Amino acid sequence: MARIIVGMSGGVDSSVAAMILKEQGHEVTGLFMKNWEDDDGYCPAKQDFLDVAAVTDKLGIDLEAVDFSVEYRDRVFSYFLKEYSSGRTPNPDILCNSEIKFKAFLDHALNLGADFIATGHYAKIERSNGKPVLCRANDKSKDQSYFLYRLKDWQLEKTLFPLGDLKKTKVRELARNAGLLVHDKKDSTGICFIGERPFRAFLSKYLKGKPGKIQTPEGRIVGEHEGLMFYTLGQRQGLGIGGPGEPWFVAGKDLENNILIVVQGREHPLLKNKTARASDLSFINNSPLPESRISAKTRYRQADAPCFITCFGDEIEACFQTPQWAITPGQSLVFYNGDICLGGGILI
């Protein structure tokens, strides 16, 4: 029997993770992390905490709440603002995992005497040559290894992912059969601290947009943008461009001249590229990438594709066999060897 502290968010996944570990006979404590100051009614933290309290009461386990909002602002949100102000599109959930859930939370749990932490992530931890490796979950449609690629082996050594072998439908079934009130709770999507509010309105509270022209690659002006930070490569909605022909997509940003570049049609050549380059590299076992069976992906909701890699000092370049769509600076390039997640870096 191990002492395990489970990070509980108020959703069905972390609730079932705690239930599984309790049924296995472990000493389980639920821990609710407050990562954002609820100052305007959009953050659902209060309701989420009530849901966690109801679940832990039903399971008969202890509950602790801890406030990591200062750490979150310093380590995650400040990076989020810096990236957007530089014209890139960051993924704060990835940094939240490496800096908050598997660092601040892990440190806190170990100080409390825990043997392991656990979360409701869909991923698996296996062993290779005596070391832990991060692997895809059995439910490939829910696999979250992409968001966990910045973890290190020492973090994986102290982590459990009880849902790694389960389908999402089975998780909801287990919760329903156990009488957990969150069995049909809607999954959270998007950036956690923005919630349901309009993205531009939220970002405008912290950064001032500089309006400019929207142009085609040939230089034809087709509209005006509200600030380059509000747009991401591949974006279709919210451009305010009408007219005949195929839909418009963001294909690039001219930061020097404050111009948003758009093209018509999802299959436009400027939206596709065979090469992707990344910096700020992080590999799980601090080992070089193997030369064969490497694949990678530049977005969470896409299949990884075979590629060849070339290292340039602190940067790495992936050359794909097939063009990848809307490779976006600030997002992550994540490498796989079969089902093993090797690590990755930030797209530049």
Image (cartoon, helix red, strand yellow):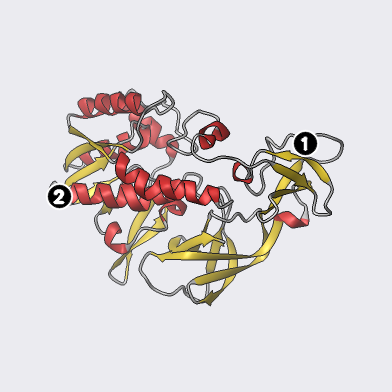
SS category of the residue bearing label 2: helix
**Circle 1 is placed at which residue position?**
241
The residue type indicated by label 2 comes to Asn
Can the viewer see residue 281?
yes
Q: Is residue 339 left or right of residue 201?
A: left
Q: Kindly give the residue lying farthest to the right in the view shown.
A: 244
Which residue does the image show at 47% across and 47% down from the upper left?
A: 80
Q: Is residue 153 left or right of residue 190?
A: left
- Of the 4 image quadrants, the one containing the C terminus is bottom right
Tag 2 or tag 1, which sits nearer the N-term?
A: 2
**Circle 2 is placed at which residue position?**
111
The answer to whether 241 is drawn above or below residue 326 in the figure is: above
Q: Measured from the top left, where is residue 31 in percent x and y?
A: 24, 37
Q: Measured from the top left, where is residue 135 in percent x and y?
A: 40, 57
The tag on residue 18 is none
Q: Is residue 27 left or right of residue 34?
A: left
Can the viewer see residue 139?
no
- How much space separates mark 1 and mark 2, taking CA atoms? 55 Å
User: How would you rate the neighbour count of disc 1 (Cα within 10 Å): few for under 14, some for 14-19, many for 20 or more?
Assistant: some
The residue type indicated by label 1 comes to Ile
Q: Measured from the top left, where is residue 308 in percent x and y?
A: 59, 72
